Every structure is written in structure tokens, then in C-alpha cells.
Image (tube, coloured by chain):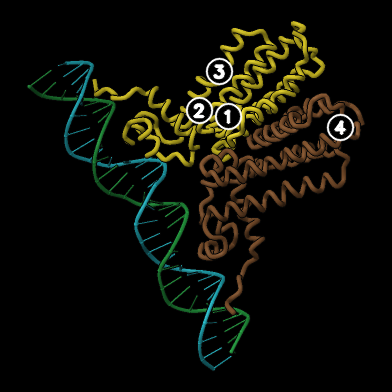
Chain colours: A brown, B yellow, C green, D cyan
DNA sequence: ATTATTCTGAAACGATCGCTACAGAATAAT
DNA sequence: ATTATTCTGTAGCGATCGTTTCAGAATAAT
């Protein structure tokens, strides 16, 4: 019973992600969002709750599609050390060809909404923790395999790599050139040593 | 001739800095700002132009008082290598005891306003460039003095240190603990080597 | 003391904000 | 075909946004 939705909820959510991503939370009005999603505001509220709930859903969708997908794919296809290198290379590649300088929704949100909303702050912290966990897993595995020297422990080095990724994302948002982003990453990669 | 201002323009600007710093540009309403500055909105517009101009002035004041002051002070008192170490230590110290998790106004702005306002974007890029220039000067001087090995060139390593600082600032904004921030910096400092 | 100029507090401007009410359209079950 | 339920477009709610207006207070120069 009842009328069916005339739009695809997931496609519309993707449009919301793009809107929040490009403009940020505060600067994305519900009218902006509804227009980008191709629906009326009544449908938006009916389907997603309110603006904040829509943002939480958009954040989760972004994390699944952009971060978790990347980590899972890279871990499946590369040895630990190469996984770290590939991850950084992808971040740089994505950031370098980012005409609108959207950067990373998670990082953008971390400095914007997350600081005014405790629950969203916890979400962002958890998402960033997943990135660090990836680095840590990879570093520990690489050390076991003898791919890296293991002079610096994985807990510390994983935090360093997370910091480097965040730094790259910030600089990318300011429209930095690829060469600069590569320079940020290069010394971190050098820490992995020259072992294959 | 004419009536005198009943408030101190610099003190009021400091209050505006705090407001923008804690809440961001969009989330700081003119009423918020005026109240924090202890003046009416008419005085605000009379003295500073409009909200955007006030923000530009606040950004400049923050850069002068927080960034340039720190760089000048540290460069005057420390040898190059120690200058880099001290700079990072101060950033971590500041970030660790930051009850409101305000982070860094420049970084916060980089991801917020700067992406929607080309002129402010250029300002932020220039300010971040000053931080990198400090690292580059220090690295080159340290290499000349034999304080660091100079295996990695200063241009690349200065970008890395800038990235690390930005990463620390992002994590600090999410309320990260001091231990995590130290872990981000530690491997970068290790790159400087153990030379005195 | 008068004049010219600037500053200030209060009020309000039109625009936009997030959000909702509501009538009608669309569908599933009867 | 009728009924029950849900969705959608429109229109508009009260609140707040950035900004301006304006009368009056304060000061410097005459």
C-alpha cells in the first residue's frame, strides 16, 4: 500500500554528498541540497529526516564509497608496503585532479561541523581511526614480512601517515599543485626504507 | 572634529578572531561577532566594513600574532634544527591544551571560507607558504651547519613538515590526545637525524 | 556656544534560513 | 472501485541572516 518514491534514494544521497563536499555543511542550504538531489524539500525531509541526519548519512556513504572501498581494494591487491605507497599515491592522484578543490569530505567536516556537534565529531574521529588502523595493519604486516626495517614502531608511524594524509588533504583543498603534495608524502615514504 | 570611538579597535578585533576561530566563518553571525566584540552592529560596520572584511582583518591579525610572532621568536632564539623541533613542540603543546579544540584559524579557514572565496584562498595559501618558508630556511641553515645530514633536500622536507603541522592541527580540532599528536611529529623529527 | 563631523544604540530592511502544513497525486491492498 | 497509506509540489511558517537607516550622543574645531 502507498505511493512509491519517485527518486532513487541512493542516487539522491550521492548528490547530497557532492553538495556537502563542495560547499561544506553550513553553506549547503536545504534548498541547495534539494535542487542538487532533484527532489523537493518535502521529499527530502520525508526520506532523510532533517539536514543534520542527511549529513550523517552522506558522511557514512562517503566513508563507505571513498575510504573503506579504497582500503579494502588496496589491501586485497597489494603487499603491505606497496599498500601504503599505493594509498598515498591514490590520495595524491585524487587531490591533484580535483578541479573544484573539494578535498576530502571527512577532513573538511572534521574542521567544520565536527567541532560544533559532538556526535558527528565522534563519527569523524572513528573514520579517521579506520585510516590509521589500515596504516598500522600494513606496517605491522610489512615488518613481519621483512619489507620494512621496523625501526619506528607501527603505532607511532601509523599516526604519522595519518597526519601526512590529512596534511595533503588540507593543502589540496587550497588548490596546491601535485608537486607539493608529492613532496609532503615523499619523506614519509622514505621512512619505509628501500627494502622491497 | 567628530566623536571618538568608544572601543579599542584592536581588542575588539581580537574578540572577532576568537569568535571566527571557535565557530568558523559561516557559523559566526554578525550578531555573535558584535556581542563578542562588545559593540553594536552599526559600530562593527562603521569600523571594519562588512563581515568578510572583518574576517580578512581577523585572519591577518591571527597570522601576525600567532604565526609570524612564533616564527620570529623561535628563529631568534634557537639554532636551525632546534628551531624546527621547538616549532613542532609548540604546535603540539598549544593543540594539546586547547579545551575548546579550536585548532588553528588558518587551517580551519583553509577548508572553509578559502574554498569559496578566491582572494581569501590566496591569503591562506600565502600564510601557509610562510610556514613552509620557515622550515625551508631552517633546514638549509641546519644543513650548512652540519646539524642535519641533508639527505633529503630542503624543498621537499619543508613541504613534509608543513603537511605534518597541518595534520596535527586537523587532529587537534577533532580533540585528539597529546600522545597522538606527538606520534604524528616523531617520525618527521627522526628524519632530521641525530646530529646535534 | 555653535557648527561640523563621527560614532552609537535601536529598530528594521529584504533575503534567506531550516522546516512544516496541506491538498492532491500515486500506489497497494481490499 | 474503494480505501488506506505514502509521496510530492507549493506555499509559507517563524527565525535568523547580513546589512542599512536614523535619530541622538559625543567630540574637535571655530
Name the secondary structure under disc 2. helix
Look at discs 1 and 3 and give the one toward the viewer: 3
Q: In front here: A189 or B115? A: A189
Name the secondary structure under disc 4. helix
Q: Earlier in the sequence, mark 1 or mark 3?
A: 3
Q: Chain of mark 2?
A: B
The Cα atoms of the two marked residues, 2 and 3, are separated by 12 Å
Cβ atoms at labels 1 and 4 below 8 Å apart: no
Q: Position of residue B122 (x, y in %)?
A: 58, 30
In the rendered structure, the answer to whether residue A132 lies left or right of residue D2 reads right
Say whether mark 2 and mark 4 are on the same chain.
no
Q: Earlier in the sequence, mark 1 or mark 2?
A: 2
The Cα atoms of the two marked residues, 1 and 4, are separated by 39 Å
Please, is residue A59 above or below residue B86 in the view? below
Q: Position of residue C4 (x, y in %)?
A: 21, 25
For label 2, the crowd category at 10 Å Cα-Cα, with few meaning under 14, some 14 to 19 and many 20 or more, is many
Q: Position of residue B178 (x, y in %)?
A: 62, 28
Dot 2 corresponds to which residue? Answer: B59
- The circle on residue B124 is 1
Dot 3 corresponds to which residue? Answer: B68
- The circle on residue A143 is 4
Cβ atoms at labels 1 and 2 below 8 Å apart: yes
Amino acid at each position: 500500500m502507498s505511493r512509491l518514491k519517485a527518486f532513487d534514494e541512493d542516487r539522491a544521497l550521492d548528490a547530497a554528498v557532492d553538495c556537502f563536499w563542495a560547499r561544506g555543511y553550513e553553506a549547503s542550504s536545504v534548498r541547495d541540497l534539494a535542487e542538487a538531489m532533484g527532489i523537493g524539500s518535502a521529499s527530502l525531509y520525508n526520506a532523510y529526516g532533517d539536514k543534520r541526519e542527511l549529513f550523517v548519512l552522506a558522511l557514512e556513504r562517503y566513508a563507505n564509497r571513498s575510504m573503506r572501498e579504497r582500503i579494502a581494494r588496496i589491501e586485497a591487491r597489494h603487499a603491505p608496503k606497496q599498500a601504503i605507497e599505493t594509498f598515498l599515491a591514490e590520495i595524491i592522484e585524487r587531490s591533484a585532479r580535483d578541479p573544484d578543490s573539494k578535498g576530502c569530505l571527512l577532513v573538511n567536516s572534521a574542521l567544520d561541523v565536527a567541532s560544533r556537534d559532538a556526535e558527528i565529531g565522534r563519527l569523524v574521529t572513528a573514520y579517521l581511526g579506520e585510516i590509521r588502523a589500515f596504516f598500522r595493519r600494513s606496517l605491522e604486516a610489512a615488518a613481519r614480512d621483512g619489507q620494512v626495517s621496523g625501526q619506528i614502531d607501527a603505532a607511532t608511524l601509523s599516526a604519522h601517515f595519518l597526519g601526512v594524509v590529512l596534511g595533503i588533504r588540507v593543502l589540496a583543498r587550497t588548490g596546491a599543485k601535485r608537486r607539493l603534495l608529492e613532496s609532503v608524502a615523499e619523506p614519509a615514504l622514505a621512512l619505509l626504507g628501500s627494502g622491497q
